[in-house]
Amino acid sequence: MKPLDWRSYPGRLARFWRTSLQFRTVAITVILSGLAVLIIGSYIAISIGNNLFASRSTQVQDQARTAHNLAQDIFASADPAGGQGPPVELDSLAGTVRDRLLPASASAEGTTFAIMRTPGQQTLQSMQPISTTDFPQQAVSEALRNSVTADPTHVQYQSVRLSDGAPAIVVGSQVQVPDAGNYELYLVYPLSDSQGTLNFVTQTLLLGGLALVLLIGAVTYIVVRLVVGPIRLAAETSERLAAGQLEQRIPERGEDVIATLARSFNGMADSLQRQITKLAELSRLQQRFVSDVSHELRTPLTTIRLAGDVLYDQREQFAPSTARTAELLHTQVQRFEVLLADLLEVSRYDAGAVELELEPTNLVRLVEDAVDSMQPLAEERGSEFRVVAPGGYFEAEVDARRIRRILRNLLGNAIEHGEGKPIVVMVDSNESAVALSVRDYGIGMTSAEISHVFDRFWRADPSRQRTIGGTGLGLAISLEDAILHDGWLEVWSDLGNGTCFRLTLPRDHALPIVSSPLELPPDDSIPIEGIDHA
Amino acid sequence: MTARILVVDDDTALAEMIGIVLRSEGFEPFFCGDGSEALAAFHASKPDLVLLDLMLPGKDGIEVCAEIRTESGVPIIMLTAKSDATDVVRGLESGADDYVVKPFNPKELVARIRTRLRPTPTGSTNVLQVGDLQLDVAGHEVTRGTAKINLTPLEFELLLALALKPQQVFTREMLLEQVWGYHYKADTRLVNVHVQRLRAKVEEDPDNPRIVMTVRGVGYRAGASG
């Protein structure tokens, strides 16, 4: 297996996001519920933490007060005379206080205490500072000492972080030691127990939240699957239906909204199938009719044609009026024949009974052939063909017979309306398309006339004499032929400056045309001999 | 000797008119208006060429064509009212040599008939070798070893055209001109269908031809002799 490039992951993810409704829905749900769980969890954790701290803090302050009173009482009772008696034995007093405080303040969490001398005092004697062995000296901040000195009547406390990172509360108060002045009692209560509880609660919340988010994600996935599944099925079915498999249906189960979707979809499919079958039947009848008419008309027409031609070949032996009759019969039978062929072709298009016979064709060769075959007619009218083919790749998958027919039509029109001026036929190609244009410099058309140019039986100027026996269906058929090739047949015309038809065909029948290699309106800057572009 | 032509068409007016045209061109026409009697008429008149309408009462023209082909290689030209692809191809596949689409003019019809009746052009050599086949040009016979292969005159002519110039690649247009006598763009399906029919007879494995080789995008040529 090919190893995946990690750089393609964001792109893949974005693509997956765009294409999968299921993924998108689950992702959004998980992200949003995760966010909600996070906010709620944090709130719970914070308030539990605060509560724990507050209750512990109250407790600690009570304990500290008790310890303070105890210490103060001991100190006070050591000097009943209030400084008037003999000097107090401070060393033994310190030992007593230490021994009495130790059990009173001891707790599971390892409370420690210290009695320090308030600095800046002149007294008779001084007591050595007392402290338990592991008292964290650095936990007593300068700020706390200051506030104890400033407000000696109350117990001061501060929450600190010990050197090992555990939270603790330091409580400070002032005690009067006889003969030695003011001392400060500090008790440090580590909060590791409360912290442990808080950690446990947070961990539980985290795990619970994660489980909840996963559960929500899974539930969403299942729900979306339940909903998206039928929609996907409907989408696939409608695609198959569109592709022509008219008997495709969605299974209808239950009474819910999905079942309603299935039912209405199937109803639509039924009606579609009915309509299409009906149309197909009509089209088949039409084709059948056309084919029958074609056969029925063609046989007598063949007899008439043979008879007319036999008479026509012998017209020299007839009296002049009979000879002329034979001539008229001959030409009009021909006209009738062309008209019939065109009509049948149009009705075949209307019935949708036309198929292309594609083969790789060289458009330039085709143009040259068509120009050669129209040459006599052009010479008769004094027009001259100029074929401009800049070179390149002119092979294209086309139905040569139809393209030849389009060309003959365009050339015929150009000769008829070109007023004897040169007719320029251009052929060019690009990556997506091949194109040819037929440009005459004749009378041209008004914009109103241009809009009718592809209409059946429409003629630019009914009063003008028809010299080339067109049926009036030529351009309509040409347009159908072009459309059948997935190509374009377009017209540009300017009254007095001539007309240009441009046919653009896809090089490959499966790929759409991007742009036409030839310009329309035609590029008149290319010099053409005998044409004045002024 | 005047060529005898059997016209199988149920439209009496058209048949009569074709008769007039044929007589004026020096042919001797015979008529038959029913598909089921066509074979009997064929036996009775022993024609040199058959003009066969595709839509006939009694029996379909395509069936008639196939029946005649089982016992004779006489040239058959279909008269068809439909230029639609399927009918023409079915007709050609059942053995018709050529077709004219109604409405046709007398010159066109006569030109088609004359092409099919003209003698096969013979080269300087009498026996040609294509692949493992021997072509007896004068005797119109094709043999593989000792086994004789029955070809219609058209099929023989097609094979001969290729065999006479073994080095040359023939485009379908060239074959249309040389074998069918078309001097303008005509239906290349004529060539395709007849090459298939010819291959079915002369190739040992028609899917892997050694006698009539396809040159992709160009046309056909004869297989190397040896």
Image: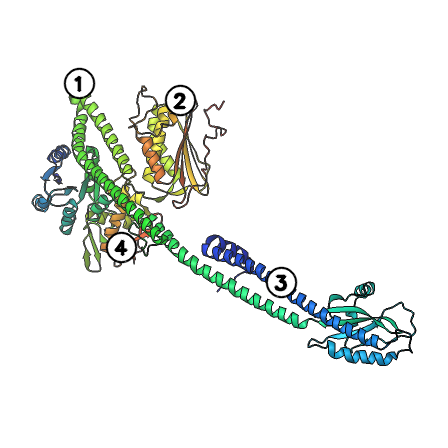
Subunit under mark 4: B
Indicate whether A38 appears above or below B175: below
Subunit under mark 2: A
Q: Which residue is mark 3?
A: A47
Camera sees residue A163? no
As drawn, is B102 to the left or to the right of A80?
left
- Tag 1–tag 2 contact (CB < 8 Å): no
Residue type at tag 3: Ser
What residue is at 21 percent from the left and 47 percent from the top? B90
Q: Which residue is mark 2?
A: A443
Indicate whether A158 appears above or below B164: below
Q: Where residue A200 sits in the image (x, y, percent)?
A: 60, 70
Please report whichever mark, 2 or 3, sits nearer to the chain's N-terminal start: 3
Nearest to the observer: residue B161 or residue A62:
A62
Please report whichever mark, 1 or 3, sits nearer to the chain's N-terminal start: 3
Q: CA distance from mark 2 to mark 3?
A: 93 Å
Secondary structure of the residue carrying tag 4 is strand
The reply to the same-chain question for discs 2 and 3 is: yes
